[in-house]
Each structure stands twice: as C-alpha cells, then as structure tokens.
Image (spheres, grey):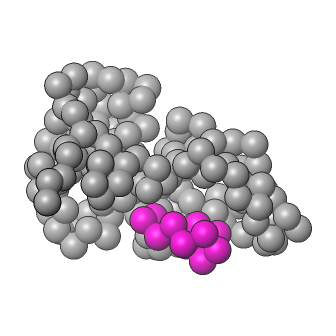
Amino acid sequence: MTITLTINGKDHDVEADPDTPLLYVLRNDLALNAAKFGCGLGQCGACTVIVDEQPVLSCVTPITLLQGKAIMTVEGLGTIDNPGRMQAAFIEEQAAQCGYCIAGMMMAGEALLRRNPDPSDDDIRAALRTNLCRCGTHMRIMAAIRRAARPQSQPMKRTG
C-alpha cells in the first residue's frame, strides 16, 4: 500500500504495510536517521518526532495514522550550517553525552516551546517525562531548553 507522508515539509510516497511504525519508515526508507530506536516500546523517547505540533513516539505509531499530518524530525529543525534554535541551544549548553537520546529530547523540547514559549522548569520536566537519558546530562538538557526559549536565542551560524 502506498501512503503519502509529509515530513519536514516534503511529501514522500511510501510503499509499506499500513501498520509499519513511522520510525522504520524514517530510518529504513527515507534515510532520516536522527530519531533513534531505543526500546521499541514507546518507553524511552529516543524516537520522538513532532506530529501536528505534538510529540509522538514514532516506534509505536503506525504510518496509517499519519497520512495528511505534518511530521517533523530533527532534520527539519535546521542544518549543520544553520542549526535551529533547539539544536543551537543543545550545542551551546553541551547537552549531549552519548547523543542517543538527544534527538528525542530536542523534539520534545521543540514541541513544548511551540505550545508554551515561556515554560517553567516544571513544564520542561513534564514535557521530558517520557524521554530517558542514562548519561546524566539532565541539567544541561534543561538549560538547553531554557536557552532555546529565550527571545534572543537565535540560530548559530557556522564559520569556516
């Protein structure tokens, strides 16, 4: 069955079983590898993407539910040369250790800021409650999301 998915503003015709989890299509069919396979049970958040402005666990979301919806992955936030506000904030705060959970953390943070541009620490903790990090950078992740929320937070431009 062919399903059209709109990912990072582009339509993709995908030939797959309608029950295929979005994560498999992102990684295996479209080479969008930022979202990670962690637990495969929707419990760790490494696979978080944004669907119609809400964080969604792509490892347990079948593609049949996503036709006609706007899907955003980390690749849609910015580029290496022009990172988005959340990517720039994570870089500036050095919030990544192993990096495995970071894509999911950034997407959960981005979804939070889209619905609440001035979140409290409790708001940030609540938004990240389904995202696990075993490296212990929780305070840097919190700082990165607070930095991304600041009005003066602008995407970084790389030089050289």
Q: Quadrant of the N terminus?
A: bottom right
Q: Is residue 97 left or right of residue 77?
A: left
Considering depth in this image, is 9 or 33 the residue closer to the camera?
Answer: 9
Q: Is residue 52 left or right of residue 39?
A: right
**Which residue is drawn at the image coordinates 22% and 22% (left, top)?**
151
Q: Quadrant of the C terminus?
A: bottom left
Asked if 92 appears above or below 121 in the picture, the reply is below
**Which residue is drawn at the image coordinates 75% and 42% (left, top)?**
68
Q: Give the image location of residue 82, x and y in percent.
A: 29, 48
**Which residue is drawn at the image coordinates 63% and 63% (left, top)?**
22
Q: Is residue 140 visible?
A: no
Q: Is residue 159 left or right of residue 16?
A: left
Q: Is residue 120 left or right of residue 140?
A: right
Q: Is residue 127 visible?
A: yes
- Whether residue 30 is in magenta: the answer is yes
Residue at the outermost right position: 1
Q: Give the image location of residue 21, x and y in percent.
A: 66, 66
Q: Give the image location of residue 45, x and y in percent.
A: 42, 59
Considering depth in this image, is 42 or 113 the residue closer to the camera?
Answer: 113
State the extent of the magenta-drawn residues as a range.
Answer: 25-35
**Which residue is drawn at the image coordinates 37% and 24% (left, top)?**
116
Residue at the outermost bottom position: 28
Asked if 88 appears above or below 132 in the picture, the reply is above
Q: Give the image location of residue 74, x and y in percent.
A: 42, 54
- Whether residue 21 is in magenta: the answer is no
Considering depth in this image, is 56 or 149 the residue closer to the camera?
Answer: 149
